[in-house]
Image (tube, rainbow, N blue to C red):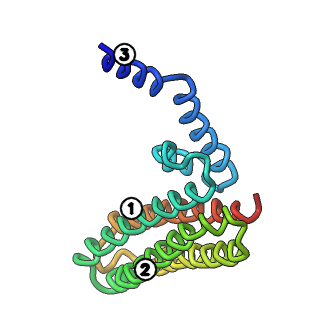
């Protein structure tokens, strides 16, 4: 009987208004931080699932945003590899270059996320390396965004010859969307030193 009462107490504590408010505060925190990005709705939608782990930490939010961007970059890179198999000529060459640009963007985004993760102890201790490490992460994320731009720019002036057609247009749109995720991640990084 005592264990049943203990179980009921634990359940009520877990669903208490304080527990619910904590999650709501985290989602409000994400919404508030995403408002400072160029794509606030996309930012909020992509980061809301991380509310329980973000726990109102700007560092954790920035890591989550970088990881979302990394996942989207990898998906786009795989899409480019699949398209390249059926493409020749200038389209095939543009896709080959795009695969390389996206792989570089993925490496840079991963490097940025790892740098942000190291910030936890430096930020809490008020360490002097905080601004330097954020600057490194910003540089890598910005370079990732440049590589995504390079991927899209490679299709300028490429006609319909060489295969792809509509599928390539969809792919270019996908990379455009990836740039939005990366832009949001960079904005959240910038907020670490501004706000």
Mark drawn on residue 131 = none
Between the residue at mark 3 and the residue at mark 1, the CA separation in whole angstroms equals 57 Å
Q: Position of residue 143 (x, y in %)?
A: 57, 79
The x and y percentages for residue 105 are: 47, 76
Q: Mark 1 highlights which residue? A: 170
- Please identify the quarter of the rendering in which residue 172 is found: bottom left
Circles 3 and 1, Cβ within 8 Å, touching? The answer is no
Residue that lies at the very extreme toward the right in this rendered image: 194
Q: Position of residue 65 (x, y in %)?
A: 53, 58
Q: Is residue 118 left or right of residue 100?
A: right
Q: Count residues near mark 2 (Cα–Cα under 10 Å), then give few for <14, some for 14-19, many for 20+.
A: some
The local secondary structure at tag 3 comes to: helix
- What residue is drawn where x is 51% and y is 44%? 51
Q: At x 47% / y 24%, what residue is drawn?
A: 13
Q: Quadrant of the C terminus?
A: bottom right
Q: Earlier along the polypeptide chain: callout 3 or callout 1?
A: 3
* Residue situated in front as seen by the camera: 5 or 194: 5
From mark 2 to mark 1, how far is it between C-alphas?
15 Å
7 with respect to 187 (left or right): left
What residue is at 33 percent from the left and 16 percent from the top? 2
153 relative to 185, above or below: below
Mark 3, residue position: 5
Of the 4 image quadrants, the one containing the N terminus is top left
Q: Nearer the viewer, residue 151 or 26?
A: 26
Residue that carries the numbered disc 2 in the rendered image: 158
Q: Position of residue 145 (x, y in %)?
A: 56, 73
Q: Which picture quadrant has residue 94?
A: bottom left
């Amino acid at each position: 009987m005592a264990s049943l009462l203990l179980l009921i107490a634990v359940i009520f504590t877990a669903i208490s208004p304080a527990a619910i408010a904590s999650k709501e505060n985290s989602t409000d925190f994400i919404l508030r931080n995403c408002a400072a990005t160029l794509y606030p709705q996309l930012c909020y939608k992509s980061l809301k699932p991380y509310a329980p782990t973000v726990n109102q930490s700007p560092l954790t939010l920035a890591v989550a945003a970088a990881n979302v961007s990394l996942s989207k970059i990898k998906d786009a890179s795989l899409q480019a590899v699949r398209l390249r198999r059926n493409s020749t000529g200038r389209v095939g060459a543009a896709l080959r270059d795009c695969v390389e640009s996206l792989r570089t963007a993925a490496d840079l985004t991963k490097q940025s996320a790892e740098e942000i993760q190291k910030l936890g102890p430096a930020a809490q201790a008020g360490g002097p390396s905080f601004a330097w490490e954020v600057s490194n992460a910003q540089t890598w994320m910005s370079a990732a965004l440049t590589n995504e731009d390079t991927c899209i720019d490679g299709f300028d002036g490429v006609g319909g010859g060489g295969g792809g057609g509509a599928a390539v247009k969809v792919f270019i749109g996908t990379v455009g969307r990836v740039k939005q995720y990366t832009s949001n991640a960079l904005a959240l990084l910038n907020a670490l030193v501004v706000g």
